[in-house]
Amino acid sequence: MAAFVQIQQHILRWRAERLLGDIRALKLGKSTWADAQKIMTRWGAWGHYDGSCTQARCSYKITLRSFECALCVYRPVQILVSLATRDAYIEADLEVINGIIWGKDFAVQVDVFGNILKGDNGYGLIASARTVWRTASFHGYDFANHPDYVVVRGNCEGCESVHSKFTPFVDPSIARDLLDFNLDCVTRLFECRDRVDIMPWVWRQVEAEEQQREAAREANPESYRPRSPSPEFLGCDRANIVIAEVVSTRTEESSSESATYATFRLDQRLKHAAFWDAQRVEEAYSSPEITSVARGDQSKLIAPGRKVILAFDSPYQISDQHMIDLGDYEALPLTNENLAAIRKGMLLDIFPAPSPRFPKESVQEH
């Protein structure tokens, strides 16, 4: 029984390594529908898609998993099999838009056995690398000097996890490192137990960046902030971009912090922002911590009568107030240079706009 399962595991690892090679070889923004079809043909026995799959739009998923052991409900068999196998699950995805591959993901989960005799079920060792269209999915992670990708430790119950996320425009050599998986964990005699075992390059990057951030905060807690993205990056990455006039500002003080609120009037839509019409004035949270403006220049930029470029993701209605929160946004001075850079970045963004975080009818009522 153990020998049979071990053979199955080596076959799984062999397939997983070849699948990873196929995914890493894809060039985001360059590989074509024909390249996607080759992968779908090669992995058709393990692949599937929901709905339709055409060169206009296709999301294709490939799943590999360990041999399912029907007899493993019995404790003696569990003990025997645990010496021969690492229960594993591998998933790969690719995304095609208008005949071009714009997304590629890869994820691995390997179960780490606990002490079966004591009823310890162990934990899951999880690693993933995923393409995101917009960095809003980074969830405010203070990425170092690389706004187009993040590496993070995961937080989950009963598991140890590590993840990388990157935009389609990340440097291809970096993308290969972000897809660095050690699939030896599927078959090795002494099981992988730590994040560095399953995703070595990414985990070392996580540890290095955590140390750098902590050192920077200790050196100067008040001034530490990640570097702001360039206007061109904002033009490509942010879902909504407008030119707006600052109508008014106000500051609210508390025992722990000071928050500035700015009221904006739409001057011109540059990208999406369909919820905002020229007759409506929006009030939004404005803090030096979430804008690209240096602390000393904040009052000069967000001042009544000034026009600024606002770049932001999905806003949301605050139900108990007559205001819409634009969320984390970047405010740029309205200059010909900034406007040209924003428009250049916008030309690269071919991705669908995300859904707003409030019902359409609530916006109309505002």
Image (cartoon, rainbow, N blue to C red):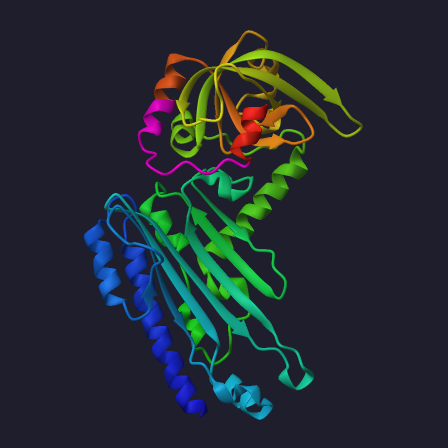
The C terminus sits in image quarter: top right
Q: Position of residue 3 (x, y in %)?
A: 41, 90
The relative height of residue 110 versus residue 328 in the rendered view (above or below) is below
**Would you say residue 22 sits in the magenta stretch?**
no
The relative height of residue 29 versus residue 112 in the rendered view (above or below) is above
Q: Which residues are magenta?
A: 342-357
Q: Residue at x 59, y 65 (%)?
A: 159
Along the line of sight, which residue is nearer the eye, 122 or 99? 99
Principal secondary structure, stretch drawn in magenta = loop
Q: Residue at x 54, y 91 (%)?
A: 77
The reply to whether residue 55 is visible in this rendering is yes
In this view, the residue farthest toward the top is: 305
Which quadrant of the structure image shows residue 17? bottom left
Q: Is residue 311 left or right of residue 40?
A: right
Along the line of sight, which residue is nearer the eye, 267 or 133? 267
The N terminus sits in image quarter: bottom left
The reply to whether residue 327 is visible in this rendering is no
Q: Position of residue 33 (x, y in %)?
A: 22, 51
**Would you say residue 348 sits in the magenta stretch?**
yes
Which quadrant of the structure image shows residue 154? bottom right
